[in-house]
Amino acid sequence: MGSRDMKDYKLGQAICDQIRVAGSVKIYNRLKDSFTGPPDIYFIKEQFALYKWRKEFFLAHFPGVPLCPTLGPALLPSLEDTWTTDCNFCCDLLGISSDIHWMAAIHYNITENFDQVLKLAFEDSRPDLLDFPTDYSASCLFNKFEWDKEKEQEVLQKLTTVDLSTAVHIICVLYNCSPPSLLQVAMRRVLELGLSLDSLPKELQVVAERGLYYIAGREAVDGLDQKERPRCLTSEGEKILNMFLSQ
């Protein structure tokens, strides 16, 4: 097998691995370019898993912890680093730490530049030190696709960056102890297959677009009716939900 054939094979394998993580070709096609918006309500679990896979792929193929060059010569990449990144804004003037800039670079490249990441990962003649682009770090600071349940306050803070319905769906994914409702399973299947929603009642069309817990104008402080509360949560999930609704 020639070098080009081997590269094509590895690229194909990487795409197959992502399809496996997503669960199907249709879900993968739905999610592969979905990371610039809010979480995809009915495919949050798969979206989070795909983000995790991409981050692990990036770190495996481009090891090292390069720091923002504008923060000073002492922070230039070490011999172990395989890539660097430049600012598109003044990190030092804005007080952006080098760690944040590094995480922002990874976040940007696995969410908005991943085709190029895949290409470079299997390129035989790539430079010893690659220069990856970086976008503003705001989306990284409140990354909606990576959650650390050990950091309770961070979870609660990040939940405030999405609407109530999305937040409850995220909690259900992070702290679930039983399968989702039949309505959620059915809605998910309709969306996966790309079926038309035009024949559905308007209420169900809103559920498909905004989730099971959406009511126009409702915020977390308004809470959920008892009959609306999800029944798939662990005790920890119930605690997080109550804390979120009482913030």
Image: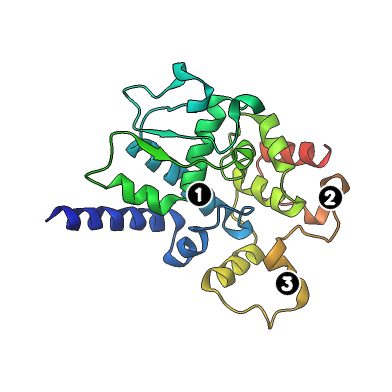
The residue under label 3 is 204
Q: Residue at x 78, y 36 (%)?
A: 243
Q: Are marks 1 and 3 in contact (CB under 8 Å)?
A: no
Image coordinates of residue 81 in percent, x first then y, are: 35, 28
Q: Is 105 above or below relative to 6?
A: above
Query: Label 1: how many residues lie within 10 Å, few (<14), some (14-19) or many (20+)?
Result: some
Give the amino acid at mark 1: Thr
Q: Toward the viewer: 84 or 205? A: 84
Separation of residues labelled 1 and 3 (CA atoms): 30 Å
- Specify the label residue 111 is tagged with: 1
Task: Give how far across and how far down residue 80 sits, in percent.
Answer: 32, 24
> Count of labels shown?
3
- Observer-side mark, 2 or 1, equals 1
Given the image, on which type of amino acid does mark 3 rest? Leu
Q: Amino acid at mark 2?
A: Glu
Report, in whole angstroms, how far the alpha carbon at label 2 lies from the one at label 1. Answer: 28 Å
Residue at screen point 62% across, 44% down: 144
Q: Farthest residue toward the top? A: 74
Foreground residue, 120 or 75? 75
On screen, residue 53 above or below 156: below
Where 80 falls versus 190 (above or below)? above
